[in-house]
Image (cartoon, rainbow, N blue to C red):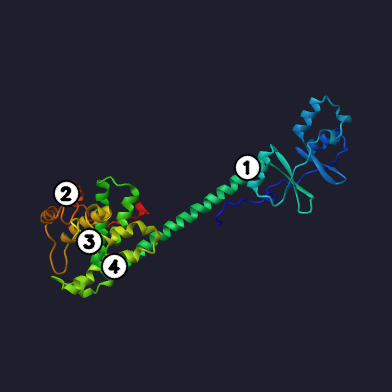
Amino acid sequence: MDNNFQSDSIKNHMTKSFICFDRGTNIFTIAGTMSKKHISCVVITEKSAPVGIITERDMVKRMVAGARDPRKTLAGDVMTSPLFCLDEDTDLIEAQQIMHKKRIRRTIVTSKNGNVIGLITQTDISKALSTTLESKLHEIQTIYTNVRRLFSDTVKALFFTLDAKDHYTGTHSKQVSILAYALCSAMNLDHQSKRDIYLAALFHDIGKIRVRDLVLNKPGKLLDEEFDEMKVHPTVSAAIVKPISELKRSIAIIRHHHEWYNGKGYPRGLKGNRIPLGSRIITVADCYNAMTTDRPYRAAMKQEDALHIIKSMSGIQFDPEVVKVFLELIARRKDIGLGTRSMLHKLI
Ligand SMILES: [Fe+2]
């Protein structure tokens, strides 16, 4: 599709069936032919060159106004002139603007060598433009649907990559995204923010595909160098989603999901409200889900124990405001965040 809206040429929408009469023709003859052939406009010529037009309406108006005798009136006496012509390649929009400006309802269409090849009215142009506009809108709608589908497929493919690398991280990410979305709703965030945070939560750990399995699934405490390897994952996650322009608002949220509210987190050690709100939301959902789900090397923590830890880390690791909303949410819906049903169809 062109960047600029371009409509069709008038030659494709003009009336090609028209009749020419010499300017010396009697109006009585012209009126008879128009009535017989059911045409409302004729082209008047002089030595075969067009010099004016006569429409049924204008002819009657001028005859009545001048109290003329039809048998004694010639075409040249009542025709509309000077003649206005438009080249056959004139764009419909341009033609509409010219005719509107000059207050012309109908014009002659000429070929490159000046021959009359048709007639076009403002109504013909309006109808043609409305059809062109409709087809352009349909084209835009199709493109929009395809772009949405492409993005949705990209998100799914990216997610399958994460899930194939480590199924636990895949399921965890889905649950964190659902819980983060519920938190966003409880905090009355707008649709765009909810979408950005949901997608950030879905891919917050995708950078773990760079972490070796023996480190990723190591039971017990990581060695310093192993922890260093693990700590790169938010930056890698952000780098993985960066080329996808639809995820650009999620990049910073992903990069900072391991920052602590007191500034002791990583990768940048951001503090308080300098940490993106989405990251502050995801980190609560992330830690809660990690604590309350089974791992091969340890059983899931009881919900009340996990909630106790979240509460105790409020203002240290977590944003107190997010913790407050989170605790209220869990009190209302104890099973929140345990489902894995994708919400992509709602958000993309
Ligand atoms: Fe993480």
Residue mark closest to the camera, 4 vs 3:
3
Q: What is the CA distance from the residue labelled 2 to the residue labelled 3?
A: 26 Å
Whichever of callouts 4 and 3 sits on the residue coming sooner in the sequence is: 4
Question: Residue visible at 13% across and 54% down?
Answer: 307
Q: Are marks 1 and 3 in contact (CB under 8 Å)?
A: no
Residue mark closest to the camera, 1 vs 3:
3
Residue that carries the numbered disc 4 in the rendered image? 207
Residue that carries the numbered disc 1 in the rendered image? 126
Mark 4, ligand 1, within 8 Å: the answer is yes
Q: Name the quarter showing ligand 1.
A: bottom left
| Element on which disc 1 rests | helix
Q: Which mark is residue 269?
A: 3
Q: Quadrant of the C terminus?
A: bottom left
User: What amino acid type is highlighted by mark number 2?
Assistant: Leu
Q: Residue 327 carries which label?
A: 2
Residue mark closest to the camera, 4 vs 2:
4
Whichever of callouts 4 and 2 sits on the residue coming sooner in the sequence is: 4
Categorize mark 4 by other alpha carbons within 10 Å: few (<14), some (14-19), many (20+).
many
